[in-house]
Amino acid sequence: MTRPELLKTLLVLTVCGACVPLNAGARDTGPAASPAPIAHFHPQGQPPSQATVALQRLARSTLPFEDQRDFEESKRGFVAAPAYTEIKTADGASAWKFGRYAFLDSKQDFDSIHPSLQRQAVLNAQYGLYEVVPGKIWQVRGFDISNITFVRGDTGWIIFDPLVSKETAAAALAFANEKLGARPVVAVVYSHSHIDHFGGVRGVIDEADVKSGKVQVIAPAGFMEAAISENVYAGNAMIRRAMYQYGLLLPQSPFGHVDQAIGKRASTGTTGLIEPTRLVARDIEEFVVDGVTMVFQNTPGTEAPAEMNTWFPQYKAFWAAENITATIHNIYTLRGALVRDALQWSKHINEALYLYGSQADVMFAAHTWPRWGNARVQEVMRTQRDVYANLNNAVLHAANQGVTINEIQNVYRLPQSLQKDWAAHSYHGSEEHNSRAVINRYLGYWDGNPATLVPASPRDSAPLYVEMMGGSDRILARSRELYDAGDYRLAIELLNKLVYAQPANQAARNLLADAFEQMGYQKESSSLRNSFLAAALELRSGIPSGLMPRAASPDTVRAMSTELWLDYLGILLDSHKADGLAFTINLVTPDNGEQHVIELSHSTLTNIQGYQAKNADLTITINRADLEPIMMRKATFASQAAAGRASLQGNAQVLQQLMACLTDFDQYFEIMPGTKAAARPTL
């Protein structure tokens, strides 16, 4: 049966009315009281279409809702929830709010949310203090997108992954101390190099205590380089794309943001970073900290470039970092990052399974909730191992038979046995974009057809498509037919050409937004859902304001190497403005003993560390500590020289020339055509 035929059959079978709660053990088909409807947040927003409703009802009838173990495990060990509803920054701004997703408490099945994603959203909406290992290990969950873990040592707390923000981490520590008894923090462990696992460190420890040796900070080898460099070179583009993947501009609503798969949203407080004092360098390395034995398993190249799991042999407890979160993660994260290695990820999980899985009584992680009992732990570990191995192997199996990067998303599906397992569902990643990522990793973006090797830009090719399809009226009419039939992908294919050709055609924009919206409603992956819904919102009313992207913290700038900063200046350089310019600058930072040569040549800015040019146009001598305000754009070389903190010997005008060639990137650059010129309402 074709997809349109399936939709028509489902539409005949579809009936309106409320369904029973997603967390019910048995599906009750009897009558239920209809809850009060929730209005769409946008005046042009559409309810789920009949086609979408039909697909959601089909999913409810085929998903394994009878498996209630996640609901039982997510509540196990609950100690208490805070009485307050908001965590604020020092200036009174909101860093975190509890209860923003209260609409999920209605136990109503929303046809605007994929049933599987709604189930995950309900599970992730819980928050509070939970006991993991009696008397030894606790987690505070739901205070941020990630979990913070407290391990009781002989004299104090060993904290794993102190959240995104100082404010949420401090609140979690205070809450744990209130309920469990106040204890000093003796060590912090960063499981990996993403900000939601280290950004709140200054809320739980003081850097002076780290420098004095009173507090250890432990991380995997390569942590600092990975933590700083991953988001620098393409950082501005990543911020903009994150607005789509994470739905940063979407309101919390059944029609908007409902979940981020491994938690809710990231907090918006103050981020920081304290450099590790102890690195885990070997594949397997054992530390004893404050009487607690921890065996670290380095897993580079998995969910992060630098990441490690931890085994607690005294407690038979396995900490899976973000390598095993009981959801398909991102092999390619849509905000932008290097494509991850699905096979290597699977192999590291397999190693953990054979090293620790046969002994573990509990497995817990930096996101979601623990799994208890050895059989259950091994089940989830095997499921996650097999998910990533199958993704790698089956996609390459298809690629080796000629399936291309532009086809694999319509070909690859997980095996039926894995589809029946909640731990194999696509909440963060998706089968569609992850399968394309595997091909991209091994074969690149080209599908092998020379017609796509050097394609015309969409803005250039779209007018020709519109002309050859008979103009906008015919395209709109055919797209409306496809939309009404539930063929949203084909409608999008046509409408996208029309919107690129005619960005001001509001009828086309509105219908494309409607099609994007229905696609978003249907997606199990929060990343895909958010991306479709964010694009729909921008097509309707422009890029919303209301979000101030987090600027790099002083800690991040201090941790950034001078070479990395100079590399970034090369990216900021507008080569057209630099045409015809040429100069050489020596940069000397005496306090750390570094020397650099910066050269502008052929409209390209390069640098090299450890050298000095003999005939440099300018030599700048400045302590690295005094360079950092310039890196943060809080000072200039001229102002630092005027204050006696820098020496400029030679032709200082080359600095002015360089600054005139640098671009200030716009964090709200246009993705969908015509959105930049539209108004930007605050939602």
Image (cartoon, rainbow, N blue to C red):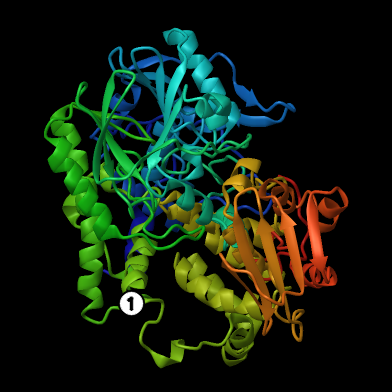
- Tell me the amino acid under the disc marked 1: Leu
Residue 191 in view: no
Quadrant (top left/top right/bottom left/bottom right) for the N terminus: bottom left
Residue shown at 34% from the left, 75% from the top = 407
Where, by quadrant of the figure, is residue 441 drawn?
bottom left
> What residue is rendered at 62% in x and 37% in y?
268
Q: Residues within 10 Å of mark 1 (few under 14, many from 20)?
A: some
Query: Secondary structure beneath disc 1?
Result: helix
- Towards the viewer: 61 or 341: 341
Foreground of the two, 284 or 519: 284
Residue identifier under label 1:
443
* Residue 328 located left or right of residue 475: left
539 w.r.t. 379: above or below: below
Q: Quadrant of the C terminus?
A: top right
Q: Is residue 165 left or right of residue 312?
A: right
Q: Is residue 509 above or below residue 448?
A: above
Q: Position of residue 218 (x, y in %)?
A: 40, 35
From what the image shows, is residue 612 above or below residue 367? below
Residue 283, horizontal then vertical, whole percent: 24, 46
Q: Position of residue 53 (x, y in %)?
A: 43, 51
Residue 47, visible in the rendered structure: yes
Quarter of image, res 678: bottom right
**Residue 578 falls in which quadrant of the image?**
bottom right
**Residue that protrudes farthest toward the right in the picture:** 642
